[in-house]
Image (spheres, grey):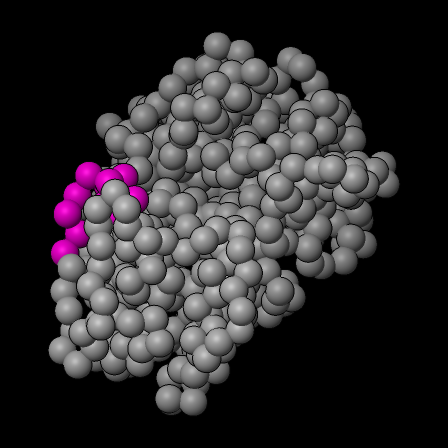
């Protein structure tokens, strides 16, 4: 199958050809005809399979096909959980629509509202936004959503998480009832799907891969280690090839900063990305990592979705995620677009239960390999009574906590020459569930991105 056979506008085909994209990925081939036909859609596919192009291409086609409008109101709204994913979607939409007269802008927190207001006043066709900052504009009446014809929820499982739900309901209330709604994600839990049915009209479904699967070209390794020796083992693994680009996941923002300081003292070029960083700092860190100016990016789970790094060879879980499904999204940063990848997890005894949940989710026996010189004093337990960090409970400060982030408080098949999709996690300044700000008793808030 080719992109031409999907009936896309010639200008879109021209842009795709210039970027070397010849044939659609399975999620694109399944989704694009349904979107063009006007159906609501639930689309699930693992990370790196082209979900962004699966909604951006038909969205651009429909806007061109409908012709110009005299109103300055946006005609399409794309909601994402994080600023990085919003910026990334804009970059892709502009690349696909480079030969079209379609305007788009991003709206997210961490930056001033002035430029965003000016862009909205000039008029845009597509708004790509995080929920909290979008609600800020709604409250100040700097955006009119009454003309939205298509709503896209990218990383819909996070958008429908309870931390985002009040903000999402408020946004949905400002949109026309007669609209097309598209939900894209790597995973759809049954309860999320049931919730989505409340605001969708007879949606069609596209499922390319089984839920919670990872790319076949990713090899998984678990290295047991005592918690207080994790940093030393991390340095040992990184030192095997100090030029290799590596994304390291820390459970906490504090731990990410501590790890970067430790790695820099050891002579590695590293930076952190998390919700306490300014948007400029986050953008610079990600840009430096993609360009190779730094070789290690230490991130909290905001980088687990939507960060598209070409041919990233390795992802290391310094801390296992508190939710097993997040392992899938973290590992989805490597092994993309037909390239091989490696996923390494440094697991202490108190994370045995988390590892057990991950192995159960993947229905796969992840290799467990001791590293010589770092054998743990307590072996991992993978039975039903395996220990795990206590979620939501602060632990007293300890040497381990100050040496790499051992805090127990949680952070909240494709081929080459195809447009890549993007998949990410929790909200930051201006990305919170703004509808909850003044409630005395409120549901669990979304964490910063």
| Residue furthest out toward the top | 202
Q: Residue 141, image x and y in percent?
A: 85, 36
Q: Residue at x 25, y 80 (%)?
A: 236
Relative to 85, 43 lies left or right: left
Q: Is residue 10 visible?
A: no
Q: Nearer the viewer, residue 396 or 234?
A: 396
| Residue furthest out toward the right | 140
Residue 193 location, quadrant: top left
Question: Does 124 sit above or below residue 346?
Answer: above
Q: Residue 130, image x and y in percent?
A: 63, 44
Question: Does 429 sit above or below residue 130?
Answer: below
Q: Quadrant of the C terminus?
A: bottom right
Q: Residue at x 27, y 39 (%)?
A: 361
Relative to 58, 292 lies left or right: left
* Numbered circles on residues, count: 0
Q: Nearer the viewer, residue 314 or 59?
A: 314
Q: Nearer the viewer, residue 75 or 83?
A: 83
Question: Does 31 sit above or below residue 103?
Answer: above
| Residue 366 falls within the magenta-colored stretch | yes
Q: Residue at x 47, y 34 (%)?
A: 157
Q: Nearer the viewer, residue 166 or 223?
A: 223
Q: Residue 124, image x and y in percent?
A: 70, 38
Q: Residue 119, image x and y in percent?
A: 75, 47
Relative to 106, 326 lies left or right: left
Question: Does 377 sit above or below residue 212?
Answer: below
Q: Residue at x 25, y 43 (%)?
A: 384
Residue interval drawn in magenta: 356-367
């Amino acid at each position: 199958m080719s992109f031409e056979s999907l009936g896309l506008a010639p200008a879109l085909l021209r842009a795709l050809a210039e970027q070397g994209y010849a044939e659609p990925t399975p999620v694109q081939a399944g989704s694009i005809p349904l979107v063009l036909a006007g159906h609501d859609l639930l689309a699930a596919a693992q990370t790196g399979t082209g979900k962004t192009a699966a909604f951006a291409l038909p969205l651009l086609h429909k806007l061109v096909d409908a012709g110009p409008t005299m109103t300055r109101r946006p005609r399409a709204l794309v909601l994402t959980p994080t600023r990085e994913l919003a910026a990334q979607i804009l970059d892709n939409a502009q690349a696909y629509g480079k030969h079209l007269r379609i305007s788009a802008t991003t709206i997210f927190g961490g930056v001033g509202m002035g430029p965003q207001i000016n862009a909205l006043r000039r008029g845009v066709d597509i708004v790509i936004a995080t929920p909290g900052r979008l609600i800020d504009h709604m409250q100040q009446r700097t955006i009119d959503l009454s003309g939205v014809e298509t709503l896209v929820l990218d990383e819909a499982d996070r958008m429908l998480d309870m931390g985002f739900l009040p903000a999402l309901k408020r946004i949905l209330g400002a949109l026309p009832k007669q609209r097309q709604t598209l939900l894209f994600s790597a995973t759809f839990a049954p309860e999320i799907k049931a919730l989505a049915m409340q605001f969708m009209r007879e949606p069609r479904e596209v499922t390319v891969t089984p839920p919670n699967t990872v790319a076949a070209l990713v090899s998984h390794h678990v290295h047991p280690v005592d918690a207080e020796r994790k940093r030393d083992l991390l340095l040992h693994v990184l030192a095997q090839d100090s030029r290799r680009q590596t994304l390291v996941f820390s459970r906490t923002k504090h731990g990410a900063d501590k790890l970067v300081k430790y790695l820099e003292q050891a002579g590695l070029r590293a930076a952190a990305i998390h919700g306490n960083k300014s948007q400029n700092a986050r953008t610079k860190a990600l840009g430096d990592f993609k360009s190779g100016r730094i070789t290690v990016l230490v991130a909290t789970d905001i980088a687990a979705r939507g960060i598209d790094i070409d041919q990233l060879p390795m992802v290391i879980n310094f801390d296992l995620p508190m939710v097993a499904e997040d392992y899938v999204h973290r590992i989805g940063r490597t092994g993309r677009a037909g390239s091989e990848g490696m996923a390494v997890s440094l697991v202490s005894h108190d994370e045995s239960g988390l590892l057990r949940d991950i192995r159960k989710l993947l229905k796969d026996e992840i290799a467990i390999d001791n590293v010589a010189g770092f054998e743990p004093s307590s072996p991992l337990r993978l039975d039903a009574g395996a220990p795990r960090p206590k979620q939501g409970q602060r632990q007293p400060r300890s040497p381990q906590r100050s040496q790499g982030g051992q805090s127990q408080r949680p952070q909240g098949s494709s081929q080459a020459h195809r447009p890549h999709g993007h998949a990410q996690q929790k909200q930051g300044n201006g990305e919170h569930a703004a509808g909850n700000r003044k409630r005395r008793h409120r549901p669990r808030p979304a964490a910063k991105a």
